[in-house]
Image (spheres, rainbow, N blue to C red):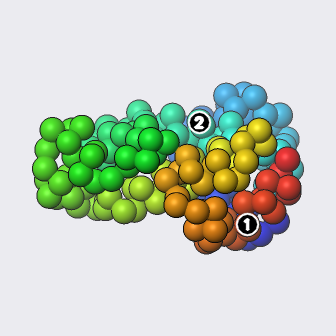
Amino acid sequence: MEPLVNHLIDRIRSYLQSAGGSLRDLANQANIPPERLAGEPTDLSLSQLARLWMLAQERMRQTPGFSPQVRELIRRKLETGRARAAVIAAELHISRQTLYKRLKQENQTFAALLEDVRREQALWFVSDTDRSLTEVAQCLGFSELSAFSRAFKRWMGLSPARFRARFS
């Protein structure tokens, strides 16, 4: 497995454990045998990785602040192709500049949040083998499969097809 994927999985485990609670508690919440969760990232199936990621997303949504609100709006708008700063600002009843300013106060940018949400959703969508990779690319707001493939490889160190084959 690529080092970037190992690093990502370790970061997800660390993030989830940072809220307190043991590895066993985390394993129970994710419905993963504790010995598999404690082992190498390669011990986890794609569905187990997806469950870990969903737990991480749920914890992020519980975090107070402005950027989690923006993140959630981006996630909801991605499939419609309307995850643009102006659209999100209008949803929040603020100007685009105010959106940028409030995100900056939290050391965030709209572009970084969009990239994060796309990466998060890409992992989830790629795990769904019923969706074609072209469909995944469209759901994430990419104009072409090749653009999505380049972004996914940058994020994960593997092409979406290789990632899907390795973890399915």
Along the line of sight, the residue nearer the viewer: 136 or 32: 136
Residue 18: percent from left, percent from top? 53, 45
Q: Is residue 16 visible?
A: no
What is the count of numbered marks? 2
As drawn, 139 above or below 106: above
Q: Which secondary structure lies at badge 2?
A: helix
Q: Residues within 10 Å of mark 1 (few under 14, many from 20)?
A: some
Residue 85: percent from left, percent from top? 28, 54
Residue 92: percent from left, percent from top? 21, 38
Along the line of sight, the residue nearer the viewer: 41 or 39: 41
Of badges 2 and 1, nearer the viewer stands 1
As drawn, 122 above or below 157: above
Task: Give amino acid for label 2.
Answer: Leu
Task: Give amino acid for label 1.
Answer: Ser
The answer to whether marks 2 and 1 mark residues whose Cβ atoms lie closer than 8 Å is no
Question: Which mark identifies residue 91?
Answer: none
Between discs 2 and 1, the one toward the N terminus: 2
Q: Is residue 27 visible?
A: yes
- Locate the N terminus by quadrant: bottom right
Q: Residue at x 56, y 56 (%)?
A: 119
Question: Which mark identifies residue 159?
Answer: 1
Q: Residue at x 73, y 68 (%)?
A: 158
> What residue is shown with label 2?
55
Q: Which secondary structure lies at badge 1?
A: loop
Residue 36 shown left or right of residue 157 in the figure: right
Quarter-wise, where is residue 24 in the image?
top right
As drawn, 39 above or below 143: above
Q: Residue at x 72, y 60 (%)?
A: 160
